[in-house]
Amino acid sequence: MMAADALASAGAAVTVYDAMPTVGRKFLLAGKSGLNITHAEDYDRFRTRFGPASARLRPALDAFTPDDVRKWAAGLGTETFVGSSRRVFPRVMKASPLLRAWLRHLDDLGVTIRTRHRWAGFEGDGLRIDAPSGPMAIRPDATLLALGGASWPRLGADAAWVEWLAGKGVAIAPFRPANCGFDVDWSHVMRAGFAGAPVKGVTATSAAGTFPGEFVISRHGIEGSLVYHHAAALRDALERDGRAALTIDLAPGRGLERLARDLARQDRKASFSSRLRKGARLEGVKVALLRELAPALMPDDPDVLARGIKRLAIPLVRPRPIAEAISSAGGVAFDGVDDGFMLRALPGLFVAGEMLDWEAPTGGYLLTACLATGRAAARGILHWLES
């Protein structure tokens, strides 16, 4: 849609084919609990959030920065604000008003949108489209594929396109879950008593760094925004070493020495739960995590207990299935794409968004890069048409 906007604004005749009954379904899903449209952290830091692909994405991001995203939304009548986490949201905290305004804008530009039209591969020198009236072939002057990765297949991103592009010599990195939860080998007591419980006011550490936030105990393991910050590092460790753990500080507001002193002051005859509540301000699911993962810490030594509270390791078994992940890693390799996002193996065919091999944490990074690569691909298409 962003590419269609830019192309139509430049005078090109544009038709959007969408496999779903309505457009922007993942956009609407992203806005279900408040559309996190971009992030307001320092831009020099922002553009490094895309892992190994950061350098390749930088020209597209430089041309459509987080500030530009906010201006674009404002131009469609959606004012935004910066939350306490520096994440940027529409003031109405919904995606639907922005999407409706955007669709009206595209209609005013003359963009044709055909829903329930699914790309089904190549047909001679054209593209096969499965339409409600039956299969059809199209032969546009230039084509942009923006078919998503492999997460949330029920919204249309099912990666069915992989075999068609691979068959034409396009290099594609295998898809892997990103921004995903992880399985943990919980006991029956933990699953039955605490599935769905939020763990708030903690920090988590992995090879990705240390971040504050919260996560949720699930029947299968752990999930939530704090887990997603670490998902790529944890997934890579599991693939590389066969094991990984997320280290949690259950009491980040207190240093180790102070925590040990506070625990040492508690009555040794009191219950373990009472000592944790009074000495460390821990109760409920946090106490359950200590009992589950570090039963050896329950003896009397306050120094040992304090260290366990500050560095509690949650051993992980595997990532959750890619169909559950918020986004995916993998896709079309950047080596096979030129600076205008055209496939080197298929001149005139362009790609953008999550089809490309990049990943980023949640927090507005994913949506911003999708918008930016769509605009960059539109520039590539215009250059191709002119040449």
Image (tube, rainbow, N blue to C red):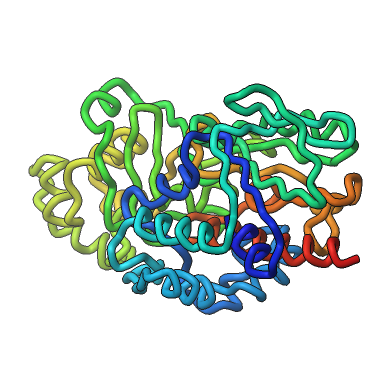
Q: In front: 377, or 103? A: 103
Picture coordinates of residue 264, whole percent (x, y): 19, 57
Picture coordinates of residue 130, whole percent (x, y): 66, 27
Horizontal side of 254 relative to 26 (left or right) equals left
Count of residue discs: 0
Quarter of the picture containing the C terminus is bottom right
194 in relation to 9, above or below: above
Picture coordinates of residue 253, whole percent (x, y): 28, 66
Quarter of the picture containing the N terminus is bottom right
The answer to which image quadrant residue 104 occupies is: bottom left
Q: In front: 29, or 52? A: 29
123 in relation to 308, above or below: above
| Residue at (48, 76) in percent of width and height | 71
| Residue at (60, 62) in percent of width and height | 5
Can residue 104 be seen in this snapshot? Answer: yes
338 in relation to 175, above or below: below
| Residue at (85, 62) in percent of width and height | 384
| Residue at (11, 40) in percent of width and height | 271
Horizontal side of 181 relative to 232 (left or right) equals left
57 in relation to 200, above or below: below
Horizontal side of 163 relative to 354 (left or right) equals right
Q: In front: 242, or 219? A: 219
Can residue 303 be seen in this snapshot? Answer: no
Horizontal side of 365 relative to 163 (left or right) equals left
